[in-house]
Image (cartoon, rainbow, N blue to C red):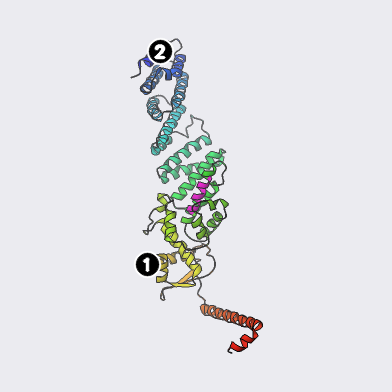
Amino acid sequence: MASKQVADAIAAAQAAPDQAAAFDSLLKNVKGLSSPATISSDLKAILDAIFAASFGLVAVRQLVTDLIAVLKDFNNHDLWIQIGQYALNILSTQQSTFHDQAAAFRELIAEGHESNEDNLEAAKVLAEIPLDSAQRKITNEDRAKIWIRIVRNYLEVDDTTTAETYLNKLKNIIYTVSDPTLNLHFKLSQARIQDAKRAFLSASQAYHEISFSTAISEEERLLTLSMAIKCAILAPAGPLRSRALGRLFKDERAATLDEFSILEKMFFDRLLAPAEVDKFAQGLAPHQLATTSDGSTVLAKAVVEHNLLGISRLYSNIGFEALGLLLGLDPEKAEDTTAKMIEQGRLVGRIDQIEEIIWFEGGEASGEKGSGRAEVTVGKEMRRWDANVQGLAEEVENVTNALQKEFPDFVIANLVV
């Protein structure tokens, strides 16, 4: 029930010769007539009186629009939700003539839910706003604003599937939107969805591009650069990730971030110690530490593949058991991981299952499926051995010649031919 002051003001407005003007004056003065304890019931009573009055439809629309403006001035999130829902219930019983007002109430309700960190409810309310109605003139920019808010709210509750549905709608119109802020939010939402779907290379590139945007603060640019580095590190080892790591390593800002030390080691294909990995894991999001289908975490899998790539730079060949010890895996798992990387074109080598030895080949993998298998050339290893022996003999001869030139007496006395 409305407070006595507001109830009297409503009665006076209903009896006034110009009811529309009287209600307009009431709305402008409602703050002075009401109190925090009664404002909700007072505004509901005013809404009821406006729709019960006999003035024209145009005047009712204007008064409802004015009430929305007054409601915003209170800056009370719970009040926005209460009055907004009450108003929508009233508007739902009217003819379809209050589309703009209903949309405005829904946006206000959603803002209230967002302020209360109830992002799922905010997304649901925004999704109820009709954006394809012929009775409302809606620009692509207006659509983009609503869809961006829906995407961001669903991302806050980790519902990437629904968020991607609305992002796909955005893809059809975003090229027509010139607002730089909306375009930035679109790119950031796209990166977050790719990150959540474990498309880490795409997410890393998107985050890195955003980190150069002047539309965000320096602190936010460094944060997105940090996200780009994390995603690149979590990506499957191979030539594509190597190029991503190279771009990030060459970014002068990267040296100021905590992730730079592990970025540097990965860029130079150095082996990672467990302590370094544990420290890096502390800064990852829950989905980046999720368990994959084979029982390992995303991070653990990325580290194993990276260390395997690093080992291939150090060894020409290695046994299954020795490789397993270096990777922290059992021999069978080490063999399986190596085989998958070779098959996917992320590592060049071949596996001798009879001798239980993995042979690594020099050079960079192409990244194309099936291209990592090294061709076995007859006598290739023997020719390599012969070349190494020949090189060693030539170096010994060079040293002997140098000694003979500098210390001939010493050579005559000690050299045994």
Whole-percent x and y of residue 207? 51, 48
Residue 143 magenta: no
Q: What amino acid does circle 1 point to?
A: Asp
- Of discs 1 and 2, which sits in the foreground? 1
Left or right: 331 with respect to 348? left
Picture quadrant where residue 80 is located: top left
Tell me the quadrant of the picture where the N terminus can be found.
top left
> Which region is colored magenta?
221-231
Report how many numbered discs are placed on residues in the image.
Answer: 2
Q: Is residue 228 magenta?
A: yes
Task: Tell me the element at label 2.
Answer: helix
Q: Circle 1 sits in a helix, a strand or a loop, which is it?
A: loop
Query: Pointer 2: what residue?
Result: 14
The amino acid on which the numbered mark 2 sits, given as a three-letter code, is Gln
Can see residue 373? Answer: no
**Which is more toward the observer, 42 or 393?**
393
Q: Residue at x 51, y 43 (%)?
A: 186
For image coordinates 64% across by 81% down, the residue present is 402
The residue carrying pointer 1 sits among few (fewer than 14), some (14 to 19) or many (20 or more) residues within 10 Å by Cα, namely some
Mark 1–mark 2 Cα distance, whole angstroms, equals 85 Å
Residue for badge 1: 330
Residue 252 drawn above or below residue 172:
below
Which x, y percent locates residue 294?
A: 37, 59
Quadrant assignment for the C terminus:
bottom right
